[in-house]
Every structure is written in structure tokens, then in C-alpha cells.
Image: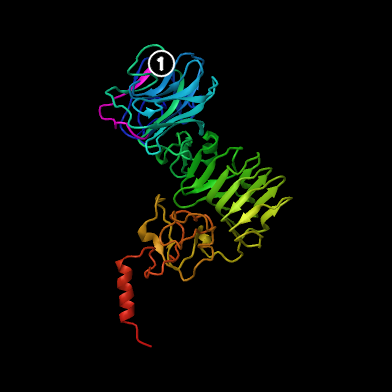
Amino acid sequence: MISHWRLDGDATDSQSSYDGVVYGDPVWIPSSQAKIGSGAIYMDGEDYIAIDANDYPALTGSFTIDAWVKTVGNNENQIIISKGQSSWRLGIEGQSNKIFFSCNGLSGTSYLPGSTSLIDGIWYHVAGVYDQLEQKMYIYLDGFLDNEANSLGTINPNTYDIWIGGDPEQPEPGYWWEGYIDNVRLYNHALSVSEIFYRERYHVDAKTGNDNNDGLKRQTAFETIQHAIEAADDGDIILVWPGIYNGPINFQQKAITIKSTADAAIIESPGDYGVLFYFGEQADSILENFIIKDSVVGISISGSSPTLRNLTVVGNDYGIDVWGYSFPQIESCILWDNEYSDIFTEAFPPNVTYSCIERTYEGEGNISVDPLFADPNNEDFHLQSQIGRYLPDQSNAPKPKPENWVIDEYHSPCIDAGPADVNPMQESMPNGGRVNIGAYGCTPFASKSPWPLKADVNFNGQVLTEDLYRFIENWIFTEPQ
């Protein structure tokens, strides 16, 4: 990403230093009316934001533009963001209210209209992509392909500034924006279809956060998970920093992902539920990489089918309760030392796979054997490892510290016990070529295991000259039989 103008009360570029200058008298609207973050901008057809292009990277090859917009009924052609008609523009056709994307200088198609008319008064995510390698132009609307065409070559450069809300090459009525714009972004590469739909990332930090913050980075994190859920929209991700968070946590029917970042966070709710799925949540409501403990019920599910992944559910009265017409997906979890039950189901058994469950539960890859936590009495649920276990400290560092790895006498059976089709490379090396189960699986804080390379003599996950030296040393000093 080159630039990200959040438009939360000003035209600051939060990604780089290409801040915009506001002209006219636009209205900065509050978070309650914005789509993302703490605000957006309303332009009345006589306002624009100019970004000095003197030092701005020339976008003549692959690039992506995207933004959130809401139209208000203007029947003229309107520009969302532009480098001028002779270069590139993203806008809306007045009569049809369809997105258009133009890249002057390309052979084949250089002007691409969308196929869907926008409805006034509704927020849409719009994006234009030129992929020079694939020789294609694309328009996306709310993450779905709206049109595409064959295009090749190089986009014309020019000397005009970049304008949000107008065309610097045609500063005249008929191109000014009238309506709402939020979160404009520019990339110097073509985003893939899986990347194109914007997902906000909210941060939560129990130690330094405040629910009056915007939550958009760790330095301005929220304090509570529930406040982040209230701020989030479908498709957003909530990143929770290490700490202890009080439940109950209610997903509120939102298709969001809530996951620990850095070392796993703890959710506990003495005398109450830890996490609730009660409003028809489906598989795109995802909870992962948490320790859930000391609650009446760790996770309670009713009439919902969420995804639960890499959780350690320990020391509750009941681990996971499943009620009514519910079909949750439970994968790579540890359920241990829950007093009355690990998984209770009223009717339909949930799909549980590659999990360690104290009371044996049928499912592919499931085991029922002591997970060998490091120090559960002191809330350290890392898995014991003879190759390397992370010893947590109070720094809450985003990455493991090299000096914090220790060696254990025993080796947990939950290491490398996850599904074989999940990429293990998020785990620190050596990682055994397979993910761990439990709260630390699929993270850099996962306990280590020998890498399955025959020539990796020192088990560091790499085959280097050090392995050759170690082999020669062992061979020379091995007594003949």
C-alpha cells in the first residue's frame, strides 16, 4: 500500500506522508454516520482534496484504487479519486450510477464501466484494479467482480496532482463529487480477488487500551473485546493483545474474526459464560487462539454454527455447550480439566476434529491424552517441548524473544497434532512441518518440534553448513563397531 486516507476528520495519509490539502467546505461526519473508523467526509460538489504529486510514485503499471462511497442522487458524472483524464480515474457515471475505471494509454480497453447501478444512500466498497501482468482491468463492488476487460500496456503519466472528489485536469461542473467518501487507498500492485474487499482491523489491549480510542492500531487500542465487536462490521478482524479479558463476550450475529495477536489472551468469566453465540452466527464468525477458563460455561452456542479454532478451554464448569439447531466447527482445540463436561450437546453433535479432549470425543484426528501444559497453576498453557517452549514475560512483545525459549524434559502430544493441510510456517522454526493444537497453534509462540529433514542434524529447520560440520564431527568421534 502506498497511501491510506482514512478521512477521519482530516486528509492525513496514515500509511505514508502524502497528506492531502482540503479545498472548499466539506463536512466531516462522525463515526456514527461513517462506514469505517471514527469519521468520513461529505462533499457537496464544490469540495476536493489535493495530494501533491511531485514526489508521488508514478502509477503507470499494475495498481489498485479502492474506497467506501455513498451516493446521494447526483445525476452527473462524479470522480471519487483521479490523476486526471489523461492518466487514471475512478468514478461514477451520472445517468447509470455505475462505477467506472479509466486508465488512459492502455491498448484494448482503457475505459471500463461497471455492471451494477449503485443505490443512493447505501455504503459500497468500490475498487479499480489494473493488472499489467495479467493484462486485465477489473472493477469490484463489495468484494465481487463487477466487470473486467482485456487491457495491456502502460498508463500515461502526467504532471497533475491527485484529487479526491474531482478531476485535476477537468476542474469543472460535471465531475465534482457529491456524497460521502471514506477510507481511500492506493496500492502500487494489483490486489487479488481474495484481498480486494476491505477488512478493518481493530486492536484490543486490556493493559493500555481505552474504549474512547478508535481501535485502529495498538497505540490506540480499545480496552474491551465487546466494545470492539460493537464497532466492527461483517468481515472485520479484531486483534486481541495479551491480557485477561472478562466475559461474557457476545458476537452479536456478526461475521467477524476475533483472534489473539502475539501470545494468547485469556477470556474468563467467573459465575457466567465466557463466550456466547446466540444469534444465528455462522462459519464466518470465527474465534481463534484464546485461552478460555474459569467460567461456568467456556463457550455457549445456541442456534448458531460458528468456527472455533486453536482454543484452549480449561478449568470451566462446562467447556463448550451446544444447544438447539447448531453445527459449530471445532478444530485444533484443547478441552481439559473442565469439571462436568468438555462438550455437551442437546441434539446435534458438533463437528470436532484434530482436538485434544479429556473425555474422549469421536472425530478425525482427535486424541485424549494429557496435553502437558507448562505451568497451568500460573496460567501458562504453552505445551512442554524437548525442542523449545516459549516462556512468556510481561513485555507482550508482538514476536517471540530469542532468549525466552526453554527446553523441557517432556514433549506434549498436542505438538504437530493439527490437520496436515494447514500451513505450519506461521510457527517458529523448527516446527515439525505440521501445526500444533491449542491456543498457540499457528502462531510464532507455538512450541517447537524437530523438522523432518534428514540432513537437518541440529534440528533448526534448515540444512546449512553447520549441519555438515555437526555430521563430520559425529562421524569422526564415533567409535567403530
- Magenta stretch, overall SS: loop
Q: Nearer the viewer, residue 387 or 384?
A: 387
Q: Is residue 157 left or right of residue 81?
A: left
Q: Is residue 184 above or below residue 453?
A: above
Residue 49 falls inside the magenta stretch: yes
Instruction: Tell me residue 407's x, y (percent).
Output: 42, 67
Residue 294 in sight in this render: no
Q: Is residue 276 left or right of residue 240?
A: right
Instruction: Tell me residue 446's x, y (percent).
Output: 46, 58
Instruction: Tell me residue 119's x, y (percent).
Output: 55, 21
Q: Residue at x 26, y 23 (%)?
A: 159
In the orientation shown, which residue stands out farthest toward the left? Answer: 54
Q: Is residue 127 left or right of residue 62?
A: right
Question: Magenta segment range?
Answer: 44-62
In the orientation shown, which residue stands out farthest toward the top? Answer: 173
Residue 231 in sight in this render: yes
Q: Is residue 383 left or right of residue 361?
A: left
> Would you call the spot at circle 1 few (<14 residues within 10 Å), some (14-19), or many (20 or more)?
many
Which quadrant is home to the C terminus? Answer: bottom left
Name the image quarter holding residue 82. Answer: top left
Q: Secondary structure at mark 1?
A: loop
Name the image quarter holding residue 191. Answer: top left
Q: Which residue is mark 1?
A: 176
Residue 470 falls inside the magenta stretch: no
Q: Is residue 157 above or below residue 48?
A: below
Instruction: Tell me residue 389's x, y (percent).
Output: 44, 62
Q: Nearer the viewer, residue 200 or 479?
A: 479
Q: Residue at x 33, y 69 (%)?
A: 467
Q: Is residue 236 above or below residue 399?
A: above
**Amino acid residing under circle 1:** Trp
In the orientation shown, which residue stands out farthest toward the bottom? Answer: 481
Q: Is residue 408 above or below residue 54?
A: below
